[in-house]
Each structure stands twice: as C-alpha cells, then as structure tokens.
Amino acid sequence: MLSYDARGVPNDAGSVFDGRAGVQHVHYERMAELVKSLTHLEPPEYFTQIALERFSPYFERPNESGLKIVGPRTYYRLVFPCEESTLNDLAYNFDYVHADGRKPNSYVTGLSERIESWQKQLRARPLLEYRRGPGFLVIRDRRPGRTRSDYSLAENETKVYLACDGGATPMAVWKSLQTGDETAIGLEDVEDFLDEMTAARLMYREDNVYLSLAVPMNPRMTSANANARITSAKAAVSNSLVTSQVLTQ
C-alpha cells in the first residue's frame, strides 16, 4: 500500500499488486476492509498490476515469485518486425502469467473498487484527527460512511492511545505506563481499551500489535513518533498483504 508523512500525505504515487504464489484471496479482502479505516489519509493515485521489466528480480528470477514470462509485450511486435529471439533482446517490458494459473484480476475487484471510492471521497476532506490537552485527548472522526463522532479520552486512555502511534503490543503499552513498581491501569484494562479502539476503527490490529490511526490536528506540535505512526499505516498493511512496499495478494 502506501507510506505517509505526518500530514497524511503519501510518500509514494500509487499502489501495485503482484499476485505472487502463497498469498491468498483473503488478504485482498482484508485490505479492502482496512481501507475503510484509512480514508482520512491520501489515497493511492492508482492500483495496478506490476510491470515485469528487464533486470528486475521478477525478470531475473521469475520462479521465485511464481511467474512465467510469456514474451515481450505485444506492442513491440508492431514496432519491430523482427524474429522473436531478436525481439526478446530488444524488449524491456514483458507479458507474464502466474505459474499456478491464478488470475489476480478476478479477485481484486473489491479492493480496486474500494480504492476508487477512497479517491472520490477525498474531495469531502474526511478527517480522523486528535487534539491533545493537559490530561486528555479528543479524537474527531469525520470519515465517510461513519457517524460523525468525537471521542474524549481520559489521561490513562490518552497515554495508551499515543503509546501505539508507532505500533505496540498490549504488554509494551502496559510497561510504558509503569512508574516505579506501580501502574495506574492493569494489563487487561489496556487490552480491553485497545480492542474498543479497534472496534471503533480508531486503531488497526495486526496479530497482537495495535496501531493508532488518528493524525494530530497540528502535526508540528507532536513528537517524532507521529511520523512513525502514519508511516506505520503502510507497514501494518504491508505485513498483512505485501512484503515491503508492494501490495500482494
């Protein structure tokens, strides 16, 4: 998917998928569901299948990704009326199929439509932002398709929510709240709160790691972790659908 800076602006232009072997349809379904929580961020400009280019790992080692190179893209034959072997030497872009016969375009429609909707919804300036005060945090949710809501968090809840701005486990959050030999909140309370925030789509959970999704109302007033939190929106998505910055299925 995408990485973002503290303003919610993407560091990449778009998103691609490659349908590599070992990645299941359900991963795209999970991504389509997750997109509902990310509409306060800038959407990708495009969603498209990867291009197989000469010198790329997909070209050099197609078997590792479950790909089979078919040959040069069709348009090369219209430009260079020569033998296939010569055309293979001239071409830079190649057509390919998946060795196991899968056809990603047949099951990424849901995600593709969700991203298209995300792009259109951006015009309404959707928001999921927070304002921090002394001992409290107010989260303002104005994302499309959701009830306009304001959440007011008390001091300990604020600490828990902000502790997840770069992604954290309940245990890590709980330990961060310790002062000396005491904590103001129990581990079970932390877990319950994180689950409540996830159910409200104010957080994203990947395995046992929770990531807060609201962005600061004034990013200049936040810590460096704010940037890490927004960037982690991609990392969290990537863990469920891709490796590094390629959306897989």
Image (cartoon, rainbow, N blue to C red):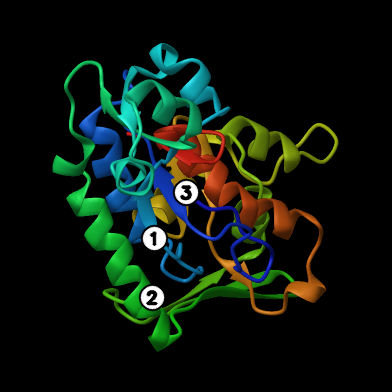
Q: Secondary structure at mark 2?
A: loop
The residue that appears at 59% across and 53% down in the rendered structure is: 3
| Relative to 167, residue 128 above or below | below
Q: Give neighbour class at mark 1: few <14, some 14-19, many 20+ (Cα, 10 Å).
A: many
Q: Which residue is mark 2?
A: 143
Q: Name the N-terminal-most of marks 2 and 1.
A: 1
Q: Quadrant of residue 148?
A: bottom left
Q: Residue 32: x percent and y percent?
A: 28, 51
Q: Which residue is mark 3?
A: 1
| Relative to 159, residue 65 above or below | above
Hey, which residue is sitting farthest top in the picture? 63
Residue 37, labelled with which disc? 1
The residue that appears at 46% across and 62% down in the rendered structure is: 44
Q: Secondary structure at mark 3?
A: loop
Q: Name the N-terminal-most of marks 2 and 3.
A: 3
| Relative to 215, residue 109 above or below | above
Instruction: Report the mark closest to the observer, 2 or 3.
Output: 3
Q: Residue 81: x percent and y percent?
A: 33, 40
Q: Nearer the viewer, residue 27 or 196?
A: 27
The residue that appears at 63% across and 52% down in the rendered structure is: 231
Q: Give neighbour class at mark 2: few <14, some 14-19, many 20+ (Cα, 10 Å).
A: many
Q: CA distance from mark 2 to mark 3?
A: 19 Å
| Relative to 113, residue 101 above or below | above
Q: CA distance from mark 2 to mark 1?
A: 8 Å
The residue that appears at 16% across and 21% down in the rendered structure is: 101
Q: Is residue 191 visible?
A: no
Q: CA distance from mark 1 to mark 3?
A: 14 Å
- Mark 2: amino acid: Arg
